[in-house]
Amino acid sequence: MNLFDNINDISGRPLADRMRPKSLDDYIGQKHLLAQGKPLRQAIASGQPHSMIFWGPPGTGKTTLGKLIAGYCEMEFITISAVLAGVKEVRAAVTRAQQLQQEQGKRTLLFVDEVHRFNKSQQDAFLPYVEDGTFTFVGATTENPSFELNNALLSRARVYVLQALQPHDLREIIDRALADSTLGLADRGITFPEKLRDELANTADGDGRRVLNLLEIAIDLADSKGQDYVDEHDLAEVLSGTLRRFDKGGEAFYDQISALHKSVRGSSPDAALYWLCRMLDGGCDPIYLMRRIVRMASEDIGNADPRGLRIALDAWESFEKLGRPEGELAIAQAVVYLASAPKSNAVYTAFKAAMSDVKAMGSVEVPIHLRNAPTKLMSELGYGKEYRYAHDEPDAYAAGENYFPEAMPERQYYHPVNRGLEIQIADKLRRLKLLDQQAKK
């Protein structure tokens, strides 16, 4: 059966499904892949598509593109979802593809949605059939294939990155749906003002399926009120509670927290505030954000401004007392302060270097003079003997004393930077080092 047979049977079908493009010329977005001369366009035109992975955010046309490829290349289109399918469904798809090949000489395109949901052994199950040409494999994923898919599968498929649709793309989708009297909404006789179309396009967050779903709901809402138009209140009601693209533990999540951290590190309070708001708007747990912000205070500000750590902890406490939305302002205050503060990763670098030595050198003995001697036996064994109590020394500093294990050379892990309070810390450490050198002469 042709993929697009019975397209006029719209009973029960949502608008997003009815408005699927029927040709590449109708396909909106992804010009970097489908413009004339681009590699994916050429692969389709050849009639011999290779196995591929479509990686991109929701609503960018991954499934539609798979169907179009099958249609253009006269292939059977079989789809399974890794969320719902198991071994039984995979075997059934393989059997169907083999039958079509043997009985009709027809090729099959197997489209696997959410392919990253399959585990390693399930992904490996496709490999023999990709190799022997039983089907052309097309996987769709919202997650980074480098992390979520097996190298064996990746080596047999080309990855194409689909981009979130731009507002002008979404506006074109809206206009088409409102103008189409066969599959779209033109026959409903409801006006959707230009200004509200732009607002809807900007709110849909690059998701073509979402924009059509929201459009259909808005039209239905106006219709239910007996109106022949959608007004601002209707659209506001439809858009209320609409979240931006965000998936805890997913690619967008880690991209955004990375952008927040790097904006703080890069001393850009405005960008840091933007990414904070993006994450809060997307539904990120503020407690998770506070844990990361406290980490930023130590990793990137450190002793250049020790107040940063205290401000971050105060923001955490304030949020726990106030909750949302009032407590979010305290988080914003901490982020802006940290982004504006002098930067130092000296403690972070020193910690990593010291930890590396600890792992490399094992359990080196604590020097006798640094051991505690709470019992008579320990005192008799010399624990703590010849320890120099710093407060009894001039300037409360035991010049020339060694605090490292005897079997280990002295190290300098901490190198204060020439910013903020660490300027003064560096001056003090230089003075103490000079006293050590003089004491050892």
Image: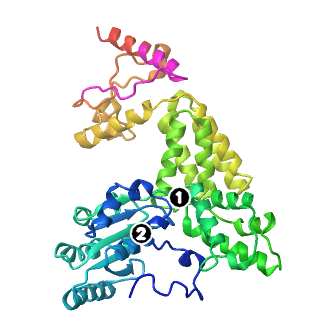
Tell me if residue 72 comes above or below residue 414 in the rendering: below
Residue neighbourhood size for the residue with mark 1, other residues' Cα within 10 Å, grouped as few (<14), some (14–19), many (≥20): many
Q: Which mark is residue 388?
A: none
**155 displayed left or right of 204:** left
**Dot 2 amino acid type:** Leu
Q: Earlier in the sequence, mark 2 or mark 1?
A: 2
The quarter of the displayed image where residue 269 is located:
top right
Q: Magenta residues?
A: 409-430
**323 displayed left or right of 8:** right
Where residue 370 appears, as percent x and y from the top left, is 35, 32
**78 displayed left or right of 243:** left
Q: Which type of secondary structure does the marked residue at label 2 adopt?
A: helix
The quarter of the displayed image where residue 35 is located:
bottom left
The quarter in which the C terminus is drawn is: top left
Q: Which mark is residue 65?
A: 2
**Dot 1 amino acid type:** Leu
Determine the residue positioned at 33% across, 11% down: 437
Tell me if residue 190 comes above or below residue 375 in the rendering: below
Q: Which type of secondary structure does the marked residue at label 1 adopt?
A: loop
| Magenta span contains residue 428 | yes
Q: CA distance from mark 2 to mark 1?
A: 14 Å
Q: Which mark is residue 165?
A: 1
Determine the residue positioned at 47% across, 74% down: 22
